[in-house]
Each structure stands twice: as structure tokens, then as C-alpha cells.
Image: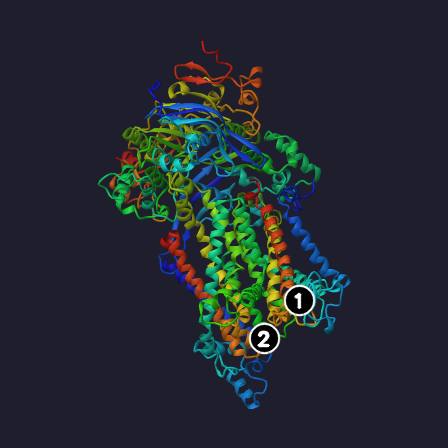
Amino acid sequence: MTAAPTPLLKIENLQAHIKLRRGTVRAVDGVDFEIAPGETLGLVGESGSGKTMTSLSILRLLPRAGGHIAGGKIELDGTDLTRVTDAVMARDWRGSRISMVSQDPLTSLNPVFTVGDQVGAPFRYHDMIPAGKSLREAIVAVLDRVRIPSPAKRLDDYPHQFSGGMRQRVVSAMAIACAPRLLIADEPTSNLDVTIQVQMMRLFRDLQAETGMGIILITHDLGVAAGICHRVAVMYAGRIVEIGDVRRIYRQPAHPYTRALLDSIPHLGQKRRRLYAIGGQPPSLIDPPPGCRFAARCPNRMAICDQSYPPSRTVAPGHRASCWLIEADT
Amino acid sequence: MTAALLEIRGLTKHFPVAGGLFAAKGAVRAVEDVSFDLFPGDTFALVGESGCGKTTIAKMILGLERPTAGSIRFKGVDIVNAGRTAMLDYRSQAQAVFQDPYASLNPRLKVKTIIAEPILAHRQERGDVLGRKVAELLDTVGLPASAAELYPHEFSGGQRQRIAIARALALQPRMIVLDEPISALDVSIRAQILNLLADIQEEFALTYLVIAHDLALVEHFSSRVGVMYLGGMVEYGPTEAVYANPAHPYTQALLASVPRPDPDHQPPEGMISGEIASALAPPPGCKFNPRCPRALPICASAVPTRVSPRAGVSHWASCHLLSQNTNT
Amino acid sequence: MAEASPRLPRGFLAGLRGRVGATGLPWVSGTMLLLVVVAALFGEAIAPHDPNGFNLAAAFKPPAWQEGGSLAYLLGTDNLGRDVLSRIIAGARVSLIVAAYAIVFSGVIGALIGMISGYFGGRVDAVIMRLVDIQMSIPSLALALMIAAVLSPSLSTVVIVIAITYWTWYARIVRGEILSLKERDYVALAKVAGCGTATIFHRHLLPNVMNTLLVLATLQVGQVIIFEASLSFLGLGIQSPEVSWGLMLADARNYITKAWWTITLPGVAIMLTCLSSNLVGDWLRDTFDPKRRQL
Amino acid sequence: MLGYIAKRGVHGLVSIVGASMLIFAISRLSGDPVLLMLPPEAPQSLVDETRRHMGLDQPLWMQYLIFAGKALTGDFGNSYRWQMPALDLVLDRLPATIQLAVAALLFSMALAIPFGVLSAVHRGTWIDNFGKGFAMLGQAMPNFWVGLLLILVFAIHLEWLPPFGHGTPAHLVMPAIALGWYPVAAQTRIIRSSMLDVLDSDYIRMGRAVGAPDWVLIWKYAFRNAAIPLVTMLGVYFAAMLGGAFVVEVIFAWPGLGRTVVEAVFSRDFPVVQAGVLFTSILFVLSNLLVDLSYGVIDPRIRRDG
């Protein structure tokens, strides 16, 4: 998937911070990327890398206490979402043009309302009920699309009567009800068993093929990302350190952090004596170090790494990384 | 074959479900007739999806849950009905590290108290001898001696897990039960802890019983593996043998479903279907039959017996497909 | 290396210091409570007049700031010419005694039963919980009336009634706390380490329960004072010549049209005392509740 | 669900029997209960007859059985002050107390729910502090004092409302406010903290991600969950209302069970005291059962696998 004509989503120098008593956490500190229609981009990184905050910024759902967008642009179909009021976001964007599936199926559904009521919500609030169908028929149809067995009967059941996997399918139904342009999947399968996880990944791929929507997949699991993403962005301490086509990222990783991650996880079938262990701890996000944020833990650390942050440089067409090891763009 | 350190025979645990006055009284069959041995120096991994009973087995081995049936013998001594002194002796030789580093350490106690707890419980050293021992343990797990005076909230997840490991080492145990030791940690920190566990196993000749759901980790870390499904053990054997040619259809499906950091790997279709059944009313015969693509009529009626796919190697699986082939 | 005694850990003291500045409120309510304690301990010394001293000539004197009032009787006098300020100061003593006894009796009994019931569970827990249900099914005031009808009403009756009724409140909350603490990983690991029940209680369960008890005790002060005042108001609690805020209100009730201050001021004393003890209790609860603290 | 209610029913029964035992025990505290049961001027013959009637020569547990047996048939002895069976008197005054307790509870919730929700939604703003402060005041003021102040202001000075008596809704206003203001603080805190948790939950964030407008999220999806802890506590608050009624009814001359029992205590009319207190506990147990029933209605997780 090389660069598509007009990008579905364009993010420029996004900064999202959380004001806490002990200081301002610069969770997302200058992130840039684009997504083409129908493309799946993986946001890969450890906890605290800013991947979830980035996705929540797009939906303008930053934590109520102190979360705010401190800078940058989020352009979807030509509109800068950072300029839009919250009411307009709810009316015109959330649920209709951008939707979300989050991590824990056990808590993503409201326990005291029926599955039908909740899946019907996007239809009701965006009056997108397909012509000639009743609300109930529309709900049954979308539940069927996410392969929930006998949806007409399960409509009036409550979330606690569904398994983890089934609940995640209900949440997916809510997300695709109004055929959104962009789906944000935040660790959609980390709470599921591995056999159910495979079924969910296949469902996302089929839904994308069916609707042509873009997907941002947020995950810490490099294996999951490899299985479904067209392009992958590796995030560390609030910034993207490397972004590119999925095969290049896994076959020729340019950034030391990406290489270290790939070496530190066990690969099925290739038993090694010892895993590579990245030393130290991720840096504080309240007053991050001036230079490259991975410098303290980087095996190829140089003097310049501690002084200034390396610019993003092209390693190959569509493959960029921010590291002083990479020569300047020739 | 040296004598087994730990022998588990017919271990079963049912949790009664209060059905109230009128509803029928049911029971969740969390663990059903599980037997295996743990040999000195081994790293035996109990693997399986959620609800398969692996954590319940660990709790019974640690004496935190009473089994409904079956026996647990440590160095030949039964620990299920052990008396106080026998139990205390067992405790000094079997310790544990749990999954969540934030819940394993009491936030109100200093690190030195947390690490010294087992030593104090067995009234071994005291005073500055104990102080030196704690400093030694901290050093063994890669933490500065000054950590002793701090509180858990002053450490990261990885550092807290190191403190938990130091505590488990305090009595120089023979066996440590590791319940999902790294699944709550960040990817880059996991390798640090895994390497630490491998180093101390060598240094202190430890035997590990590991509870895990990450099959890639199990292949890297364990020497022997037992695959659990809905309370029963479906396959057991040396890790290489089980991973090289998994005998049970569930093990095959599990291994196939593991996500691999390789963009060209596509999980094969149709290895497994549907959802895990409820442990309140497990399916008759082989519990995996409703989801098994190669289920035979017999699978829904008779419980399969253990069959070794190849003689000699202590690798068996309980599946009718195997028993059909060997005796036809 | 001292063996682990459950002194309040460094975190606790630091927490207290850090929090006091944040919400100034506890200083106000703290000093208010201190005033009541001082009044209770040194009542006779600082009261301008004898609380029971009749002076019919000076009956119904309004508070000093109102015309007709005099500086001798700052808060005015009641129908028998007794000085309202002195009686309020004397009333503080009764409230403190009732609160102290109540907390000690019901607190200790309730906490012990709650801990036993929570930790051992099973039949013991079921029996205790039924006892608590029975106790709670009779409103404490109704129970107090029954006892007052049988025994002659007095300060000791009030304390007995409170001890009998309020222990369930502690038992239920401590039991809930123990039930949740019992499931914590570090308690399971203590068992695996070989610690006996006593050590587990001593090192892991008690420190948390102590904090909860402290919060409950401060919150209970207000409730107990109001309970005593209600009983005395009905004439079934403190009997004169003892002085109680509730009793003052009962006397003042017949002269509601003539002397607004006799009906208002004792109530204000009750309100300020309860308000400040509740505020201290709430502030303690926030200090101990890690979830609310770091925001 | 049926199992759940049956279990709660049995617990309720045990509570009532337990309450009757407690009442019986208290009546025996003073040694000679006959003096309690009869007016001081009762002739000796009546005293002996009552002594035998109550089986005072029997062992204590036998006396209880007699007491309980008679109680079951509705015989709590006669009130000599009102010259009628104690039971009839109690049943006659019960409705007034229920009416007052329910009105007070409704008033308290009418304040607590908006305060709690708004405090949570506008956490940390002046609304939050005002709500907490107002509720905190309520918890620090004895209900009888609130009653007296209300009478002083609204009945005496402004003469808007009748200070005493029963009958028209106007009579109900002040007693209900006096009785209902006390639990507002506790209820507000429960709603506020459960609302805070619910608003931070994944399913509310999912609701926002689906584009539901704020008022739907707060008053439909969030409130329904936040109200559960309050409903479970309704039984306890109803008991607090019953307890409080004893005092408030005295101030407003409200013809309820509370005032009757208080007067019975003063006139040493013990049969009425006994019957009145027992019925208070029966009322409490029934209200708890009602709460458990409604609990199943609002929380489906209880309803299906109860």
C-alpha cells in the first residue's frame, strides 16, 4: 500500500498532555502520521508510550481530569478535529465517522442495559437507520455481520450473559453500525484467549474488506500487529520512533528500539538461549530528557543522542525513523 | 529418572455454586483428575486458556485451596492433610511469585520487612544478620541495598517483581511456583525478569512450576509442559517433543493460533471453532469434542485415556484419535 | 533490624502533613473540636456562671448584642434566668463523655466481631450477620425507648443503649474491609511464607482496619451526640440537674415564641460540634483513600 | 431470582423472631414485668391474675413461648391508657408513620440525587463544594432541632404552615423536611462516589465514542448504574426514618406510631411500647424485602442468576 492519493487521516505534530498535581504528563509529545482509506496502521509500543492517548485525541475523549490537546492538527476528510466543539464531535463524528473498540470486553458494555439497546444507540443518535428497516431489524443485521449466533434471540439479553469473545463482537457491532470512515481498535484482543483472538482478527479484516474503512490498531503485542497491519508505527515515550511498511519494520528494523523489542520477545519455533533484555526504565514524561528518549537504554548510544532529538529521516520509500544512526536524507 | 520432587495424583477441585433454595445445586468443576510429576531442576509449565484450572492447581499446591480429591506429595510427604510442623517445613521449601507486582507487596511495609517476612515466619536469623541477608537477596535480584528502606510505591512494576522474587528466595526453597510471573509487565522489562529467573534457577538449583498462557514464552522458558483444557490435562511431555509434534488437536489449534511477529504468517483456518464451554456443565466424553474439527462419535460419549504417540519419551495426550491409531 | 511493628508507616505521616495544607478546612474543624474538648474538661473553671444557678429576676435576657441584653450574660438567659453560655459549656461535657464511651464500647466490640466474622467466614460469619440483622431491624431510638421504659433514664442508660446499637455499624464495615483484604495477593503470599493467623492480622490486616476505625470513630462522634440530644430532648436521656444540649432544647421548646435564642443556640452548638467532627472524618477518609489522593 | 427472595425472606423472619426475643429480654430486665404491664393502682387480684396469665412462674424460655404465642395471635395485652388492645392502637397509628417516613425518604432523595449527580459531573467546581457543604450541614443538625427552627420560621413568623397536627398535605411538609434532611449527606456521598466511578467507566467512554449526547450519558446510561448502591441502602435509610420519626412526631404532634410509643413510655403503658417497637422492626424487615425485590428489577445481573 504505497502512498494513497488523499489521506483519510493526517496528524501533524500532535501534543496531548494530562495536567496532574505533580506536574503535566506530556503523554503525546509531537506525533505525525497519515492513514489511507482502507489501510490498517499499527500503533505499537509499551504502556506509557502514548499510543492510547494518541487514539483518544482523535476521538477527543482524553481523560476528563486534566487531559487536553496541547497542540498539533488532526485532519480527517479535510476537517481539523482539534478545532471542533465537543457537541459537534458527538453529533457529527463520534460513532458515525470515527468509532472505537476498546480493550476490556467485560467493562465496555453497560451492565444494566440490553445488548439491543446499546447496539441501537449509534443508529438512534445519528439517525442512520437504513431505509425501509426498523431499528430492531438494523440491530439484528449488524449483530449478524459480526457473526453473533441467532442475533434476533440474543437482542434482549444482557452483557453478563455473553462470553468475553461475544461481548467484543457486540462492541464491534456498535462500532461499525454507521459504517464509519475510521475504526480505532485499542488493544481489542489482549483480554481474549488466543484461539478467540484469531477469530476477532479475522473479523476485523473481513469488516475492513467489506466497508473499506481505515483501522488504527493499538497494541503492545508485535505478533498481533504483524498479523493484520499494512503499516506499523513504533512509539516510545510519547513519540513515533519508526514508521513504515509492516514487512520492512519486521525484516529490516531501522531504529535500535524496534530491533531491541523484536529481540526481547520469544519467537515460536526459534528457541534461543537468552532473550535480549533492554536495561533501565522508560523516561519520565513530566520532564522528558532533551535528546533521544531511548538514549539511556540504547545499545548504540552516542554523545549526540543525549544532546538533541534526532529528526525523522527516510530509510526507504515510506519507511522513516528518528535516530542519529541513520544518515541525513540524501 | 531421579525421584520426583512433587507428585500430583488425581487432583480435583469443585467449587459448589449456591443454587439457593429452589434452583438446583451445581458445582464448577475447576480441576478434574489431574496427575503429573515435577522433577528436581525442571521448569514445568502448566499452559492453557482462561478457565482451564491452571491457577487453581497452583493454589492447591501452595496450600491456599483444599483439593476436593486427589493427593499432593512433596518429597514423598503428603501436604494436603499435613500437620502444622510438616506444613511449616513444606513452606520453607516451596515459595511463590504471583502475577501482579502491585498486589504482591503490602504498600504499608518497607521492602526489608517484605523480603524478611518468610525468614521471620520461620524464626531463623534476626537483627543485623537478617539485615545482611536482605541486602544479599536484593543484590541477587539486581536491586541496591538501599532499596530495603523504601516503600513499594517507590518502585516500577519490574522492580517490584524483583522484590517479590527476592522474597521467594529468602528461605533458599527447593521449588518456586511462578503464577504468570511476567504477563503484567511491559515487553522490554519481561526479558529482564525471565533472564533473572533463569540465572537464579542455576545458581540455587531451583525447580519451577510455571503457570502461563503465552505459548512462545513457554517454549523459551520451560523444559516440560502440560496443556490444560477446561479443568483437565490433555497433553503432557518435554517441551521440544510437544512443540515439534503436538499430539492433541487442542494443542495443535493453540500453537497455530499464537500470533507471530512475522507478517507473512497466516494462522490456518478451521483448527478450532466456537467458544469454550462452561465449567458448570462441561460437555460429556472428551470436553474438547464440541470444538474439535476431527471429533469422532466416541469423543462425545467416552472420556479418552492417555496414549503416548511414540514409545520411550514420556509424552502423552488423552485423545481418541491417538488410541484409535495405535490399536488398529 | 527491628522486627516489623505496625507503627504508622512513614507514608501515613507524610500523607497527613501533605494533605493538611491542601484543604485548609481541617484546621477550622480541628480547632472547633479542640474548643469543645477544652469546654468539656475545664467546664466549671471557664463558665462565667453556675450552669444551674437560678436568677428569676434575669429570666429571658436576650443575647448581649441584642438590646436588652447584658455583657454579664453573653448569650442571654433562659426561662429560669440560667446563663445560656455556661449551660452550653457544661453540655459539652456530656456530649464528649457519651461520644468517648460510645466509640470505645461499640468501636472495640464491633471491630472485634467484624474481624472474626470477616476472617473466619462460614457458619461463624452467618450467625454473626444474623445477629447484626436482628440488631438493625430495631431502630436504635426505639430500642432506647424500650430500655428507658424499663430502666430509669440516665447518662449510663444512654451509653448502654449506644453501645448495644452502634456496634453493628462497626462490625459490618470492618467485616467488609477484612473480606476484601483477605483476598489480597500479599496476604496469600504471607501464608505461603509460613506466617500464622496472628502475624497476618498483626502485619497485614490491622493497619488497614485501624485507619478505617479512625475514620468511623470521627464520623460516629456527630451521630452519637445527636442521638443523645434526641433522647434527652424526649426526656429519656440525661436528667437535670445534669446539663445536656438536648435537654436545653427540650426546656426551651415551651418558650419558642418568647426566647428565640434559647431554642437556637444549643442547636448551633450541636451543629458546630458534629459538623467539625464529620469534616475531620471526611478529611481522614480522603487522606487514607489512595484512589482519591493522587489526583 | 426466586431463590434470592426466599433466602432474604427467611433472613427477615429470623430478624423478626430475634427482635421479639430482644424485646422480651429487655422487658425482663427490670425483674418484675407485671409492674410494667399494669397501672400502679391496679388491685392485687388483677396483679396475681396477670402474673399467672403471663406464666411468670414458668422458666424464662417458657415465658417467651407464651409471649410469642400470644403475639402471633395479636394479643400484646391491653393499653390501659387508651382502654383498647395494644395491637389495634398500633395498627391504627402505623399508617401515619409510614406516610411520614416515605415522604421524608422521598424528600431526602429529591435533594440527594441531583446534588450527588451534579457534584460528580461538575467535580471540583463550586457546584461540587456547595452540594457537599449543604448535605454536610444536614448531617450535623438533629432532626428535632430542624423541626423547631422550621416551626419558629414558617409557622410562627411567616405563618405559612400549620405548626402541629395532621390531615392536609401542608401538615406533612415540615415534618418530612425535618426528618428527611439528615440522610441527605450520606445519600449524596453514595451517589456522588458511585457516579464518579461510573463516569470513568469503559462503557460510558464507549457511550461517548458512539456519539450519545451528554444528558443521555449522564441521566440514562450512567445514573441507572450509579443508583444501584443507593437502592441497596434504601432499607437502612428507611430504618433511620423510622427511628427519627419517634422524635419528629413528638414535635409536630404527628399521630404516628413514634409519638404513641413515646407517650406510652411516659405513661408506663408497656404493652403499647412492646407492640409498637416490634411493629417498627416488622415494618423495617418488610421494607428491606421490598428493596431486595426492586434490586432485582434495576440490576439484571441479580434477576437472572439470583
Q: Nearer the viewer, residue B160 or D47?
A: D47
> Callout 2, which amino acid?
Ala
The answer to whether marks 2 and 1 sit on the same chain is yes
Residue B68 as seen in the image, left or right of residue A36: right
- Residue at the extreme front of the image, as rendered: C67
Q: Which mark is residue C149?
A: 2
Residue D117's x, y, as percent?
A: 47, 49
Q: Nearer the viewer, mark 2 or mark 1?
A: 1
- Residue at the extreme left of the image, as rendered: A132
Tell which circle, 2 or 1, labels the residue nearer the N-terminal end.
Answer: 2
Residue A157's x, y, as percent?
A: 32, 48
Rendered position, D297 above or below B250: below
Q: Nearer the viewer, residue D206 or C111?
A: D206
Residue B111 as seen in the image, left or right of residue A94: right
Name the quarter where the N terminus of chain D is drawn.
bottom left
Rendered position, C137 above or below D124: below
- Residue at the extreme top of the image, as rendered: A330
Residue A58 as seen in the image, left or right of residue B149: left
Q: Which residue is mark 1?
A: C244
**Badge 1: how crowded within 10 Å, few (<14), some, or many (20+)?**
many
Q: What chain does badge 1 belong to?
A: C
Residue B128's x, y, as percent?
A: 70, 37
Q: Nearer the viewer, residue D170 or C251?
A: D170
Residue C111's x, y, as percent?
A: 59, 57
Q: What chain does badge 2 belong to?
A: C
Q: Residue at x 62, y 38 (%)?
A: B151
For residue C18, what is the image quadrant? top right
Q: Disc count in the image?
A: 2
> Callout 1, which amino acid?
Ser
Tell me if I can see residue C137 in this picture: no
**Badge 2: how crowded within 10 Å, few (<14), some, or many (20+)?**
many
